[in-house]
Amino acid sequence: MARDTEKEPGRLKTMWSIFKMTREHDKRALPLMLLAFFGPIIIVTVLAIVFRQDVLFLILWIVSGVLIGLMLMMMTLTWRAEKIAFAQIEGRPGAVGSVLKSGLRGNWTTSEMPVAVNPKTQDAVYRAVGKPGVVLIAEGPQQRVARILGEEQRKVKRIVPNVPIHVIEIGPDSPLELRKLTKTMRRLKKTLARAEVMAVANRLTSLGQSSLPIPKGIDPRRVRPGRPR
């Protein structure tokens, strides 16, 4: 019991820090959080009055509205905080790897480190294997990353010729935002069974990964944006 009591202030302090960071960099965050909190309370109170229920029933409705409001407020805070964090790391080397490592769950095999990288520009290609097949994610401008992306596609086709290959590009000239990467990957058409995913991933390990130095990504859920100048 004592340990649980000691942990609670840490969680509260963390949430307060996230709230302050979010409010500082997102002026819409606080109004949206207040709307998310008070909206359900107002709605359930009005409904209780309209249906003319007794006082106990009204209190229960209001309590339910408060609980729903708290949940929606926390969801809003998480949503706005992650949006800020992703915006801060987008375009930085290693950002894609960090998102793949922390954002993909289930039957996916991936790595925080790229499978191919240009040491001069730090443009990189990452690989993930899941039920949709093999997904290659290019990090960098399309023209610069095209060569190493093409080379990686040819390698994968040679090792697993009958497996679908999907290409996703993340960069300054790509319409896809970094924060939508994992959602886009999950929406790809599933063609492999779970056992096939493991088999493909094992075969591709023979390709190895790039040993060239590249900064590891920044966890979007832990990054602390710098103060605006």
Image (tube, helix red, strand yellow):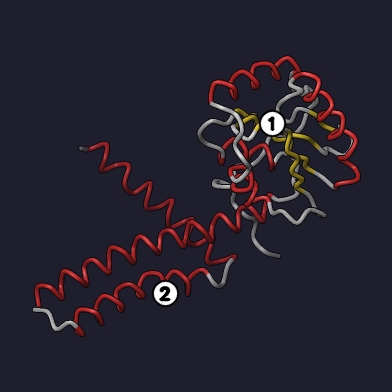
Residue drawn at x 76%, y 23% is 161
In the displayed structure, would residue 127 be above or below residue 39? above
User: Is 50 rendered above or below residue 160?
Assistant: below
Q: Locate residue 82: give its quadrant.
A: bottom right
Report if the CB atoms under discs 2 and 1 are less than 8 Å apart: no
* In the image: residue 70, left or right of residue 136: left
Viewer-closest of 152 and 139: 152
In the structure shown, which secondary structural element does the residue marked by tag 1 occupy? strand
Q: Secondary structure at mark 2?
A: helix
Q: Residue at x 77, y 42 (%)?
A: 139
* In this rendering, the label closer to the viewer, 2 or 1: 1
Examine the rendered structure and indicate whether residue 36 appears above or below residue 213: below
Q: Which quadrant of the figure contains the N terminus?
A: top left
Q: Quadrant of residue 225?
A: bottom right
Is residue 38 found left or right of 21 in the rendered image?
left
Q: Which mark is residue 207?
A: none
Could you tell me which residue is drawn at 66 percent across and 56 percent down? Answer: 87
Q: Position of residue 227 (x, y in %)?
A: 64, 60
Residue 166 % position (x, y): 73, 38
Image quadrant in which you'd find residue 229: bottom right
Q: Amino acid at mark 2?
A: Leu
Q: Give amino acid for label 1.
A: Val
Location of mark 2 (residue): 35
Determine whether, in the image, residue 26 is placed left or right of residue 170: left
Name the residue: 77% across, 25% down: 156
In the rendering, which numbered label is found on residue 134?
1
Question: Dot 1: within a 10 Å radius of its alpha carbon, few (fewer than 14), some, or many (20 or more) residues?
Answer: many
Counting residues from the start of the chain, the first of labels 2 and 1 encountered is: 2
